[in-house]
Amino acid sequence: MRDKNTFWSSAAKDGLLLGGISVAYVLIIFLMSKIQGGVGITFIMNVLSSLLWIAKFSGSLIFLRFCIHRWQSGSEDEEGSGSRYGAAVALLSALVYSGFHFAYITFVTPDAFVESIDILAQAGALDSKSLELMKEMAPSMPLYSFIGNLIYCTLFGIIASAIFGRPKQNPF
């Protein structure tokens, strides 16, 4: 049986790596957005962006599954240890990614929310009250985004951990 320090130390390392996958994806997409070109280049960048997202998503799930199975192989006597370990990795990964995303939208793209609101206003999608409310909320959006990402990523990781962490049962 492993102790709690080993559990959290290992989960922190795996969570940092798992969160790093999403951080790397955001950075690559940011760098790709700087490439200027015509319609053909834009189309290629959109296709590459979609392929990178698929690779990130599937790679994250494969890595989480690998981490859970690696942890389970060292603690065969504990029921549900894989699910608990996966949930811890998911939480720590969500903290890494959400913290990075908060910094990214606060310092790298601080006007993104204001620009989005302006686009909605120009399209006539908002009435005057909604527009004023959105403009008042814009400075708080990085915090809301942090909380939303943290909750979403953690819940998604917990669900994936519950699936991957089920003990293997012999059906016969």
Image (cartoon, helix red, strand yellow):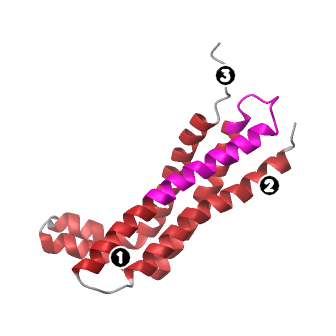
| Camera-nearest residue between 15 and 64 | 64
Q: Is residue 109 visible?
A: no
What is the x, y in percent for residue 8?
77, 51
- Disc 3 from disc 2: Cα separation: 29 Å
- Magenta span: chief secondary structure: helix
Question: Dot 2 corresponds to which residue?
Answer: 9
Above or below: residue 32 compared with residue 76: below
Question: Dot 3 corresponds to which residue?
Answer: 169
What is the x, y in percent for residue 152?
48, 51
Q: Is residue 76 magenta?
A: yes
In front: label 1 or label 3: 3
- Badge 3 crowding class, 10 Å Cα cut-off, few under 14, some 14 to 19, many 20 or more, is few
- Badge 2 crowding class, 10 Å Cα cut-off, few under 14, some 14 to 19, many 20 or more, is few
Is tag 3's residue or tag 2's residue first in the polypeptide sequence? 2
- CB atoms at circles 1 and 2 under 8 Å apart? no
Residue drawn at 16 percent across, 68 percent down:
128
